[in-house]
Amino acid sequence: MNPVIRGPLFSVVPAAGVGQRMQAGIPKQYLTLAGKTLTEHTVQRLLSFAPIESVVVAVSADDPWWPTLPVASHRRVHAVTGGQSRAESVRNALAQVLMDGGEDAWVLVHDMARPLVRLSDIQSLLASTAEQGAILALPVVDTIKQAGGDSQIDDTLNRDIIWRALTPQLFPAAALYEALSGDLADVTDEASALERQGWRPKLVAGHSDNIKITVPEDLPLARFYLARQFEEQGDL
């Protein structure tokens, strides 16, 4: 493993949200993809990455679905109660990580709604990280417009310097826990919390099939990508 990572490695998965944009009647993490819930796909893929000591999942206090999944009782899976926001849920999970792994622990924070992350991308993230962490990301290929308040174009941005943030995002657990203290209103991902502290995490290019399932039309696309990954076999 990268010598920068001197302590044990954990994964944190916030999963206390309801995913209203899916309009599914149940939280989107419990929708099925190829016969398994998104939660099972995501957690099992993280568990298959051997360096991860444990996967800490932050779930809603009144979640009736999580306890019914076989993966919930896996010896390397721990559940904590999530918060009102993603940032609060991640912080609650980090408290468990620090309890189990100590101040030198590192953490991969991953979206539960990204069930197709490749293990090769996680390995690249670990190999490429520096002291201030790293995130999986994709360079933007579309032309990007900046809109004004009237939904008219104000500017065309330079796409050569714009990346889409993905997950996992990899950081020292103690530093991330501290960064997620205080006002979390403008924190949209873990990197943004540390950026407020002056950190400059590395951007590591990942695969475009690491999609976040957010709206109903994402599920057929995920089925396509999953089938293609199974055909490729060795490049997960």
Image (cartoon, rainbow, N blue to C red):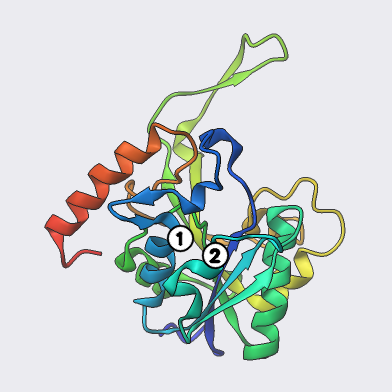
User: Which residue sits at x=61%, y=70%?
Assistant: 132
Amino acid found under the numbered disc labelled 1: Thr
- The answer to whether residue 231 is left or right of residue 20 is left
User: Which residue sits at x=64%, y=11%?
Assistant: 151
Q: Nearer the viewer, residue 72 or 163?
A: 72
User: Which residue sits at x=59%, y=17%?
Assistant: 155
Q: Is residue 226 visible?
A: yes
Which numbered marker is on residue 218? none
Is the N terminus in the top left, top right, bottom left or bottom right quadrant? bottom left
Which numbered marker is on residue 66? 2
Q: Is residue 103 visible?
A: no
Is the C terminus in the top left, top right, bottom left or bottom right quadrant? bottom left
Instruction: Name above or below for residue 126 compared with residue 160.
Output: below
Give percent across and percent down for residue 108: 53, 70
Q: Nearer the viewer, residue 232 or 216?
A: 216
Instruction: Read off the residue under disc 1.
Output: 39
Q: Nearer the viewer, residue 102 or 203?
A: 102
Q: Secondary structure at mark 2?
A: helix
Is tag 1's residue or tag 2's residue first in the polypeptide sequence? 1
**Label 1 vs label 2, nearer the camera:** 2
Amino acid found under the numbered disc labelled 2: Trp
Q: Quadrant of residue 56?
A: bottom right
Asked if the residues shown at circle 1 and circle 2 are in contact, with their CB atoms under 8 angstroms apart, the answer is yes
Q: Mark 1 Cα within 10 Å, few/some/many (few <14, many 20+)? A: many
Q: Mark 2 Cα within 10 Å, few/some/many (few <14, many 20+)? A: many
Give percent across and percent down for residue 200: 62, 60
User: Which residue sits at x=63%, y=53%?
Assistant: 189
Give percent across and percent down for residue 213: 45, 43
Give percent across and percent down for residue 71: 44, 73
- The answer to whether residue 127 is left or right of residue 223 is right
- The answer to whether residue 14 is left or right of residue 37 is right
Distance from disc 1 to disc 2, alpha carbons, whole Å, reads 9 Å
